[in-house]
Image: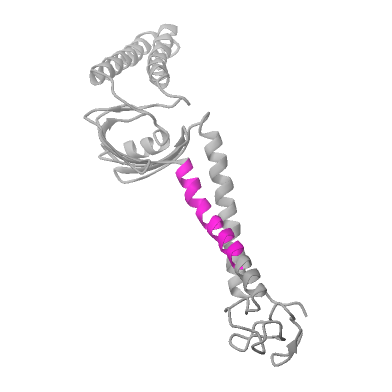
Amino acid sequence: MPAVPSTTRILARLTATVWAVVCVTLLTLWALSRSHALAYGRASGTQSWHAAVREDTIWLSRVSEWSDAAAARDGARVAPGARPLISIRRFDVRVGLVTQARDFLIAHAAQLRGHNGPDDPEAAAEERAARDLTTRFHDDLRRSSIPPADPLVAYSTVDVRQTWGVTFEGAWVHAPPDYGPPVLLRAIGIPCWLVAVALGLWPSAAMARHFWRAHRARCRARRRRCPACGYDLRATADPDGPTLARCPECGVASAASTDTEPAEVVR
């Protein structure tokens, strides 16, 4: 009947499998972060949480003070990968001008449709111009980041701190998609290399422990001691005398023999 693996071995194998999957996932995201903005967002009430990987950094962010729950949902859908955090002078004025021009075009198009009918070509042209105005505005902002993404625009002074390579940011910002009233951003940026080093500590420690135990067992075997506890296995005081087949302290078989009884003496 085949031996059943112990619970400890099952847990060890499961842990190793999960660790391998996490490492492969991290390396894949790390490689893709240089050309893609990978992000995920979730909203709850007037707050949203974001996770993004871009430019070799994992960003974990919380954005609060959205105007309402709908704005938070839109922000979670569009803004999770928003980077970098930039500063633009008189950004409020620029957003206001773009919004004013877009609203004017949409209102004038509605007025034309009311006068000339729903199929008025001039109204359709003005609606396209309103959409193009917003698209060009966002495209101009996206040029400030590689890989392209809608950036966050600082409304106030940005509080930036770095500790052991980890970046902590806090600021009131204008966030996509509409760059409306400022919201409060709290973000943590963790370099991918730091996460890789942290994940590599466990297997490195396990390998070091394995090689150390093997080296210690060989050294003890040369000195005719128990490979597990170091107990002296010489049956007599003669250095060249017989050796006990099994350690009387812990019961582990000696290097001389693994098949004999504990009380048996082998050469």
Q: What quarter of the picture does the N terminus occupy? A: bottom right
* Residue 114 place in picture, x, y as percent: 35, 13
Quadrant position of the C terminus in the picture: bottom right
* Residue 226 percent coordinates (x, y): 62, 79
Q: How many marks?
A: 0
User: As drawn, is 5 to the left or to the right of 128?
Assistant: right
Q: Position of residue 81 (x, y in %)?
A: 42, 34
Chain part drawn in magenta: 193-213
Query: Vertically, is 38 above or below 103?
Result: below
Tell me residue 178's x, y (percent).
33, 27
Name which residue lies at 70% across and 93% down. 263
Relative to 198, residue 210 above or below: below
Which quarter of the figure has residue 86? top left
Q: How is the image coloured?
A: one colour
Q: Which residue is pictured at 58% across the width and 87% down the height? A: 249
Question: Is the stretch drawn in magenta largely helix, strand or loop?
Answer: helix
